[in-house]
């Protein structure tokens, strides 16, 4: 049931081994140390009141605490969502209904396909087309849905292209999912990747939190660069969150030290968000300039995004990734996102490392 995930197996250890990490999409200026407290949090104060992490997340997204479940990262939250919707597919007598369908966007992030398959769903795909600027089209969801639809899964920003969808468009997809009998899951780990905050909630990014029939997942890994904490969340209707919490009894719990450090992070969120957004702006500009200046690359660099799905004129994604790796540069082959002809370029590290890495990558691309 739980088969290997090729992307996670491929990427394991590579960011640490690479001389220039242009493959990881989380925002952090320095390599994490082995210390218990992440360097970003060392000199920051912890909250003195008894506000819970759950309450902090609820306030961040302007939802009720009962609509929030703290998880061990976004991957854990996505797993719980898939397992919960399949559990909701049982009859009152505990008998399973016919095989439940989960729809996942294509191109898309491979684990979002593998995880629901692992818990017993039938996974089908609906397209986000390049010629449509990777828009989310509710009619494509409706046309792909079966009578046994349980869940529609999307990412925002879209992984791997970086396309950002507004709340109105997400609401339309949520309605299409509801009309077909399913929930909408929006993985929002990249939603805060905006150069200027759009609102006072959700770390300044677009969010689907609070929309009817919608589940939102997020974490402190990508925008905050705090992946070592393994802290994420699931936000959705109270009845769904209650069922998801029951599902957590079957998997490991969130570690209390991680909860404590996450409380410190959110207590100082204004400081951390400002630093992440500054790094994002710097690296988005580098990415946009790098692609614009090259005649051998094609692909959109969306406003505010520090990653993009790109294609080389003469080499496929595997060739680009392999040749780059030979020179100590990590980029990710597009085959892990259903786009074998492309590669994902992600600028999440310090500007100094990025500049050196792009110089080496430029030489690699010119040699192909």
Image (cartoon, rainbow, N blue to C red):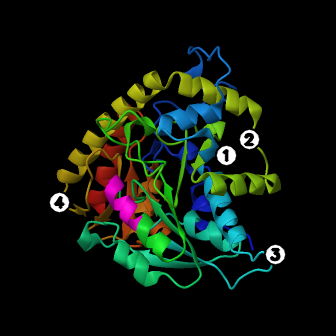
**Residue on which disc 1 sits:** 71
Q: Are marks 1 and 4 in contact (CB under 8 Å)?
A: no
Magenta residues, start to end? 162-173
**Residue on which disc 3 sits:** 94
| Quadrant in which the C terminus appears | bottom left
**Nearer-the-camera pick, 16 or 38:** 38
| Quadrant in which the N terminus appears | bottom right
Camera-nearest label, 2 or 4: 2
Helix, strand or loop status at disc 3: loop
Camera-nearest label, 1 or 4: 1
Query: Is residue 364 visible from the viewing direction of this image?
Result: no
**Earlier-in-chain disc, 1 versus 2:** 1
User: Where residue 22 sits in the image (x, y, percent)?
Assistant: 42, 47
Q: CA distance from mark 1 to mark 4?
A: 44 Å
How many residues crowd mark 3 within 10 Å: few (<14), some (14–19), many (20+)?
few
Lateral position of residue 276 relative to residue 363, left or right: right
Helix, strand or loop status at disc 2: loop
**Nearer-the-camera pick, 89 or 314:** 89
**Earlier-in-chain disc, 1 versus 3:** 1
**Earlier-in-chain disc, 2 versus 3:** 3
**Earlier-in-chain disc, 2 versus 4:** 2
Q: Are marks 1 and 2 in contact (CB under 8 Å)?
A: yes
**Earlier-in-chain disc, 4 versus 3:** 3
Camera-nearest label, 4 or 3: 3
**Residue on which disc 4 sits:** 295
**Residue on which disc 2 sits:** 254
248 is higher (above) or lower (below) than 31? below
Q: CA distance from mark 2 to mark 4?
A: 47 Å
């Amino acid at each position: 049931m739980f088969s290997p995930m090729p992307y996670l197996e491929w990427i394991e250890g590579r960011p640490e081994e690479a001389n220039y990490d242009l493959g990881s999409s989380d925002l952090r200026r320095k390599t994490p140390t082995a210390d218990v407290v992440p360097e970003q949090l060392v000199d920051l104060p912890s909250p003195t009141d008894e506000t819970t992490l759950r309450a902090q997340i609820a306030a961040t997204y302007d939802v009720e605490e009962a609509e929030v479940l703290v998880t061990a990262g976004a991957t854990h939250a996505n797993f719980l969502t898939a397992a919960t919707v399949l559990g909701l597919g049982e009859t009152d007598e505990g008998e399973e209904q016919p095989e439940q369908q989960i729809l996942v966007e294509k191109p898309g992030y491979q684990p979002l396909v593998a995880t629901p398959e692992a818990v017993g769903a039938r996974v089908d795909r609906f397209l986000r087309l390049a010629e449509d600027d990777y828009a989310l089209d509710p009619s494509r969801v409706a046309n792909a849905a079966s009578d046994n639809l349980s869940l529609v899964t999307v990412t925002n920003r879209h992984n791997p292209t970086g396309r950002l969808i507004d709340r109105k468009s997400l609401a339309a997809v949520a309605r299409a999912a509801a009309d077909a009998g399913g929930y909408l899951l929006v993985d929002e780990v990249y939603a805060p990747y905006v150069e200027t905050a759009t609102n006072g909630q959700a770390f300044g990014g677009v969010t689907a939190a609070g929309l009817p029939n919608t589940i939102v997942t997020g974490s402190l890994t990508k925008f905050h660069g705090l992946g070592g904490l393994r802290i994420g969340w699931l936000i959705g209707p109270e009845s769904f969150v209650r069922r998801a919490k029951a599902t957590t009894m079957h998997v490991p719990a969130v570690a209390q030290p991680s909860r404590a450090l996450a409380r410190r992070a959110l207590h100082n969120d204004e400081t951390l968000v400002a630093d992440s957004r500054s790094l994002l702006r710097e690296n988005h500009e580098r990415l946009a300039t790098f692609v614009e200046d090259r005649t051998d690359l094609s692909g959109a660099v969306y406003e505010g995004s520090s990653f993009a799905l790109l294609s080389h004129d003469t080499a496929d994604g595997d060739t680009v990734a392999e040749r780059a790796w030979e020179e100590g540069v990590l980029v990710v082959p597009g085959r892990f996102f259903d786009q074998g002809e492309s590669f994902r370029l992600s600028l999440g590290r310090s500007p100094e490392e990025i500049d050196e890495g792009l110089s080496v990558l430029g030489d690699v691309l010119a040699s192909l």
